[in-house]
Image (cartoon, rainbow, N blue to C red):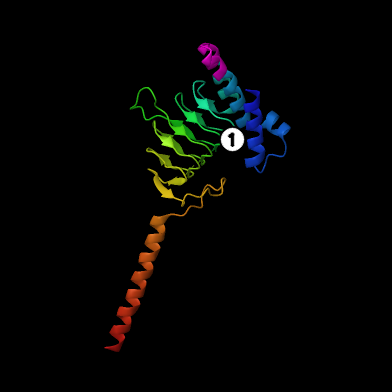
Amino acid sequence: MFKTLKADLDSYIEKDPAARNRLEVFLLYSGYKAVRKYRRAHWFYEHNMKLIARFLSQRARHKTGVEIHPAAKIGKGLVIDHGMGVVIGETTVIGDNCVLYQNVTLGGTGKDSGKRHPTLGNNVMIGAGAKVLGPFKVGDNARVAAGAVVLSEVPPNSTAVGVPARVVRINGERPDFLDQIHYSDPVALELCRLMYEIDELKKEVQKQHDTV
């Protein structure tokens, strides 16, 4: 557990430009406090002391504004930036070195039983206000844009944008990890191309009309 908590601290220093040192993160960052308390609650949950686990998780929710079910499985290096309003459901699985921003929900749709919540791969970024709902996987190095509502699988090395979210490929390259808004949107690019062609055709028609 201590190695994992150290990895969490290191991840804040790497990914949060506002984090000046580990002591500051340890003492003052609500997202880190929430993850630290979750890891303790998860230990009790795994040792069949579920009442103590839920008590600890509810206290953490009250103090940090972050609600993490103690049964969730979270890898090392998780960063919850700002933290307020983050909800992580019971059957959620989160890989290593992921980033969640404020008001993110990793939840269920109410239609599933058993595995009800999403699985995040490694190096996943979920933007502010995004909702990922259902028992599907968000692949390694994927990003979910701020405000998106994701209801189906997101492949590795891709981006989900919009409501409901659609998947946008990024050519298999890991993008700027902290950029939540600048995405290569092929739909928008295609619309721009068509508008340009229409404009050129209008000019050609007008030119022929003027010569008649």
- 59, above or below 108, in the image: above
At a point 38% along the width and 60% down the height, the residue shown is: 190
Q: Quadrant of residue 205?
A: bottom left
Image quarter where the C terminus lies is bottom left
- 97, above or below 58, in the image: below
Which one is in front, 37 or 175? Answer: 175
At a point 66% along the width and 44% down the height, the residue shown is: 17
- In the rendered image, residue 153, in percent from the top left (x then y), is placed at 39, 38
Pointer 1 local density, CA inside 10 Å: few below 14, some 14–19, many at least 20: many
Task: Name the amino acid type tagged 1.
Answer: Val
Image quarter where the N terminus lies is top right
Q: Which residue is mark 1?
A: 79
Horizontal placement of 82 versus 155: left or right? right
| Residue 110 is one of the magenta-drawn residues | no
Horizontal placement of 198 versus 23: left or right? left
Q: Range of the magenta residues?
A: 42-54
Q: Quadrant of residue 8?
A: top right
Main SS, magenta residues: helix
At a point 43% along the width and 54% down the height, the residue shown is: 185
- 204, above or below 141, in the image: below
- In the rendered image, residue 11, in percent from the top left (x then y), is placed at 63, 36
Horizontal placement of 163 versus 73: left or right? left
| Residue 46 is one of the magenta-drawn residues | yes
Q: Secondary structure at mark 1?
A: strand
